[in-house]
Image: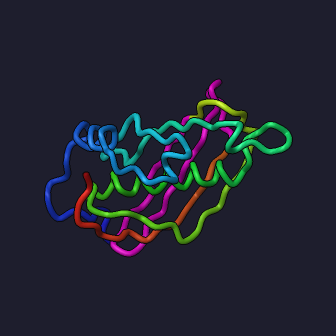
Amino acid sequence: MSDTLADSPAPTDEEILARFQRSTRQPPCSQTLGFRVVAVSQAERTVEVTFEAKAELFGNPMKQIQGGYLCAMLDECMSVACQVASGMTHVAPTVEMKTSFFRPAMPGPLRGVGRVIRLGKTIAFTEGELFDAEGRMVAKATGTAVPTPFKSYK
């Protein structure tokens, strides 16, 4: 199994970050989560992202962020890490995901870290972590995804 997917030179980390930050085609689900990429590392196969967990959208009766939204955030972290690790040549639909919750997530900013453990031509293994504003881990996920080529990313 190959540990890289790109046949041509990958863009630099700075170029990838700039693409994410200036994109006008962010998916509605990402917009809803308040998703923003703040750092990428192709060498480490990681991304750092932020989310804005809004009480009026994601709050449960206990005024905490409902776990399904945290799963969506973790999925976003892991998928974007796969895109970055592929040199922006592939998307990575998730086929399996396991999530552990460590503490309640409260409304406000959350920081996510996604990483690719193994990237092959037909399968990718990923991890994602979410942290609250105080830097405490609130949830962690592992995932399996299918790298799928796409034509362009703008």
Quick check: 104 above or below 128?
Answer: above
Residue in view at x 65 percent, y 48 percent: 70
> Where does the image place residue 147, in percent across and percent down from the top left?
38, 68
Residue in view at x 71 percent, y 36 percent: 55
Quick check: 59 above or below 135?
Answer: below
Residue 133 located left or right of residue 18: right
Looking at the image, which residue sits at the far top?
A: 134
Residue 51 located left or right of residue 14: right
> Where does the image place residue 77, in percent across and percent down from the top left?
49, 49
Tell me where the magenta segment starts and ends, as one range: 111-138
> Where does the image place residue 74, in percent across and percent down from the top left?
57, 50
Snapshot quadrant of residue 2: bottom left
Residue in view at x 57 percent, y 49 percent: 73
Say how many tags the image has: 0
Q: How is the image coloured?
A: rainbow
In this view of the protein, which residue sits in the foreground, 18 or 127?
Answer: 18
Residue in view at x 59 percent, y 54 percent: 72
> Where does the image place residue 110, in percent across and percent down from the top left?
59, 34
Magenta stretch, main secondary structure class: strand
Residue 137 colored magenta? yes
Residue 131 located left or right of residue 5: right
In this view of the protein, which residue sits in the foreground, 71 or 45?
Answer: 71
Snapshot quadrant of residue 124: bottom left
Snapshot quadrant of residue 63: top right
Residue 99 colored magenta? no
Pick the quarter of the image with the N terminus.
bottom left
Quick check: 33 above or below 38?
Answer: below
Looking at the image, which residue sits at the far left?
A: 8
